Every structure is written in structure tokens, then in C-alpha cells.
Image: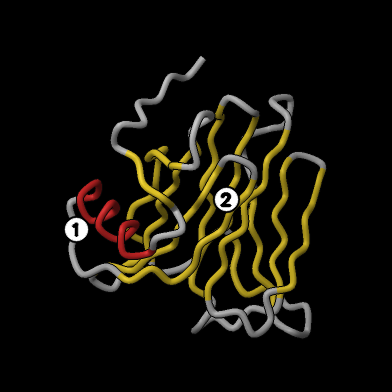
Amino acid sequence: MLCLDYSHSVDNKNEFALMRFIEERDNVSNISIIKQSDYENIHSILYTCNGSIKLFIMEKSTISNRYKYFDGSGGSSGFGTYNCFDSNGVLIIVYGDNSSLNASKYAMENGTVTYLENIENIDYVLRIYRFPRSFDMNSNLYLYDSNGGLIREY
């Protein structure tokens, strides 16, 4: 069982406190939060710093409404997936900047299951998926234009 120390935690509803929490934890400054997403006990944040997009993931305390740092992903200029095991199964987060790609949809494949998401007119994507532990942790990500043409594969 994973035991997390929530003495260094934050209220995820306070954006100013979240920014300070991220800046202290990641040793960065002048960040801008561009998107947030919740799923069950996971709160994910997409933020920019020095031209890079970063993913910051927090896990909710079982005894309070506060969140503790769980993990994250380094700088990126495009799309990506974050994949890991946690106490509840396989966690996959699709995230990225769609402002210049203008993808209409993405397909995220996990084993024999494919999830299609419409992202037309969405500049930044941040979507959390959770699968049972029996699922393959690996995933493939495909971005498509409005005509169904493949833009990029990750």
C-alpha cells in the first residue's frame, strides 16, 4: 500500500496556492496554469513554464480534501501520454497542446480498447483514464484532422 505524507498538500480549488505549490515542488517560477482535470482521487494540471508544457499530478487525501504531489511529466511542446500504476489500477493521462496542430480528434489505444475523443476547437487537451490492473499500461495515441487524416502518432 502506498503511504503518502499530506503535510505538504494543497487545496486544489485555490489556483494561487496551486501555482505556489507547483513552483516550489518543481523548482520553477512564473508558471501559467492552462487546464485542470479531475478523475476520482486524481487531480491533474497542465501548465506552461519557459515555453514548455508540463503535467503535474496530485492525489487526494483519504482523510481530507487536500491534494499531495503524485507525479508529473517534464517539458513537452506537443502531445503525450502519462502512464503508470497506482493503488487503483492503471492510470493513463492524455495531454498536450492542440493550438497549432488543430487536431479534430484523437484515438488512444490501450490493448484491444480504443477511445475516440473529439477535440475540435480545443486548444489544450487533458483527459484522465483509469483501467483495471489487468490492462496493458502501454498506450498508443493518434491525432486526426477533420477529414480523418492522421496528423501524428505518439
Which quadrant would residue 136 be assigned to in this image? Answer: top right
Given the current orientation, which residue lies at the most extreme top position?
1
Pointer 2: residues within 10 angstroms few (<14), some, or many (20+)?
A: many
- In the rendered image, which residue does mark 1 sit on? 28
Q: Say which element carries label 1.
A: loop
Q: Say which element carries label 2.
A: strand
Q: Is residue 87 left or right of residue 116?
A: left
Point 66% across, 63% down: residue? 142
Name the foreground residue: 131 vs 40.
40
From what the image shows, is residue 108 above or below residue 63?
Answer: below
How far across and down, in percent of the image, does residue 118 sit?
Answer: 74, 72
Q: Amino acid at mark 2?
A: Ile
Quadrant for the C terminus, please.
bottom right
Point 74% across, 84% down: residue? 146
Between discs 2 and 1, the one toward the N terminus: 1
Point 29% across, 37% down: residue? 8
How far across and down, in percent of the image, does residue 104 sit?
Answer: 70, 79
From what the image shows, is residue 64 above or below residue 38?
Answer: above
Name the mark nearer the viewer: 2 or 1: 1
Q: Is residue 22 left or right of residue 145?
A: left
Pointer 1: residues within 10 angstroms few (<14), some, or many (20+)?
A: few
- In the rendered image, which residue does mark 2 sit on? 93
Name the foreground residue: 46 vs 81.
46
Point 60% across, 39% down: residue? 91
How far across and down, in percent of the image, does residue 57 sit?
Answer: 44, 47
Colouring scheme, one of rainbow, by chain, secondary structure, one colour:
secondary structure
Q: Which mark is residue 90?
A: none
Q: Amino acid at mark 1?
A: Val
